[in-house]
Image: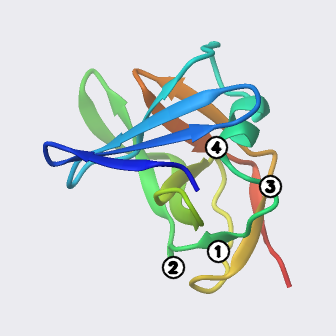
Amino acid sequence: MSPLFIEGGKIKLTIKTEQHTLNYRFMKGTTMKAQYNKRKGGYSAELANNILDRSKAIHSLSETLEPQMKFEDGKRTDEVIAYKGWFSQSGLPPFEVKFTDQVKLPPYLSIITFDHLQACEVNYNIYFKADGIKEVK
């Protein structure tokens, strides 16, 4: 288990792997933030594999997908460009995954796997995307 620290109302979690060290900071009402010591541009399966433990189950938390709308000139349009759902894995905070196409979500708390899961770091925030989702039976 990784050490968990509380500093001035913030929760800090450090996860060490053979190749990388990830430092997560959490504040009430915010999303997962990570400091990743090996930065590369764009999405990669390598980053996703370093964050998530493939030997542990991933659970689906969302019952419906949330549409992500397109913005033009700082204004929201009616065009849906992606769909997002929430998932969890033991030892990590809940995380959001983006899908370009609408996928069928399994029942709440089902164990799932992702098709082509990738992650990207932007300003110390980790974003995930996948091509699809499958329920593990």
Residue 54, disc:
3
Q: Amino acid at mark 1?
A: Leu
CA distance separating discs 2 and 4: 18 Å
Residue 44 placement (x, y as % from top left): 73, 28
How far separated are the C-alphas under marks 3 and 1? 20 Å
Badge 2 vs badge 4, beta-carbon distance below 8 Å? no
Horizontal arrangement in the rendering, residue 40 relative to residue 134 (left or right)? left
The residue that label 4 is drawn on is 129
Q: Earlier in the sequence, mark 3 or mark 1?
A: 3
Residue 63 numbered tag = 2
Q: Amino acid at mark 2?
A: Glu
Q: Are marks 2 and 1 in contact (CB under 8 Å)?
A: yes
Residue bearing the label numbered 1: 105
The CA span between labels 2 and 1 is 7 Å
Q: Where is residue 83? Give x, y as percent.
A: 53, 54
**Residue 130: horizontal and vertical position, in percent?**
70, 47
**The quarter of the displayed image where residue 20 is located:** top right
Q: Secondary structure at mark 3?
A: loop
- Answer with mark 1 or mark 4, whichever residue precedes in sequence: 1
The residue at the point 47 percent across, 60 percent down is: 94
Q: CA distance from mark 2 to mark 3?
A: 23 Å
What amino acid is labelled 4 in the image?
A: Lys
